[in-house]
Image: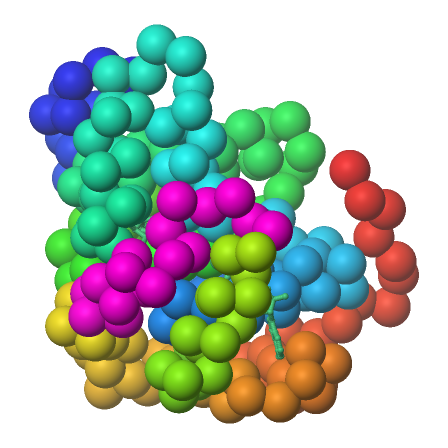
Amino acid sequence: MPAIDQLAAAKRTNPLYTPEQATVIFVLGGPGAGKGTQCAKLVQDYGFKHLSAGDLLREEQDRPGSEFGDMIKSYIKEGTIVPMEVTIQLLENAMGAAIEKEGKKMFLIDGFPRKMDQALHFEKTVVPSKFTLFFDCPEDVMEERLINRGKTSGRADDNAESIKKRFKTFVETSMPVVDAFEKEGRVVKVMATRSPEEVYEDVKVGLKTKGIEVPTFKFVAN
Ligand code: ADP
Ligand code: C5P
Ligand code: MG
């Protein structure tokens, strides 16, 4: 990718897609709330394309020759938010590929937007979101899940010190995004404390309130 200020998303002033070309649902919630777990279930039943901003950043961090690798690594370790131009460009690239190569139109954008500037810029330059699916989970539950995940995830930020920093960023920087969408009536909130299966039942009910139902045909994984 070129220098940050040269990225296409940084320069554009109109949305790249109409909501008909790309239906986007943002999936938010604190670290460990279960976003990835629920998105995997939604992919199976509804055929969404799941794009996790964190996964895309980790991939870019590990890509040989990436000029953003070191920067991303330090932001992730510190639990702070990577400059939006990079994350939005990665999302835009992944959406474009899914639309062109897989014919996808429905997207779950997981772990994004985590900061107000990301929300405003994405909706202005890529596509306005349909709504936000928000997983509400107390910190003690998320902490336990993350410590557990850390035993096998190999993630540099699933440790007590980084988790503390990520919670602080979530409260101070990411929750205001959810609050702003909520004020606009654009949030479907689901309690995330019960089992994955029980949470998923509530997710399906929530999606139905926005007119999204499980298709009658089965999606073939690709
Ligand atoms: P996020 O993507 O929001 O950070 P994950 O989906 O990776 O969260 O879940 C964090 C950890 O908690 C994972 O180890 C996952 O298996 C586990 N987990 C997810 N949902 C639940 C749940 N409802 N109850 C118990 N554990 C869960
Ligand atoms: O969502 P996930 O927990 O995988 O995100 C891991 C880290 O990636 C975050 O703590 C943050 O440092 C970075 N990130 C970001 N901007 C996003 C999503 C993730 O900077 N929108
Ligand atoms: Mg995740």
The stretch of residues the image draws in magenta is 152-169
Q: Is residue 170 above or below residue 70?
A: below
Q: Let me know if residue 113 appears in the view.
A: no
Residue 96 x %, y %:
48, 31
Residue at the image point whose x is 81% and y is 44% from the top: 221
The quadrant of the picture occupied by the C terminus is top right
Q: Is residue 190 above or below residue 180?
A: below
- Foreground: 160 or 107? 160
Residue 178 x %, y %:
28, 76
Left or right: 47 in relation to 178: right
Q: Residue furthest top?
A: 65
User: Residue 10 sits in which quadrant?
Assistant: top left
Residue 125 x %, y %:
25, 43
Residue at the image point whose x is 14% and y is 55% from the top: 117
Left or right: 185 in relation to 104: left
The quadrant of the picture occupied by the N terminus is top left
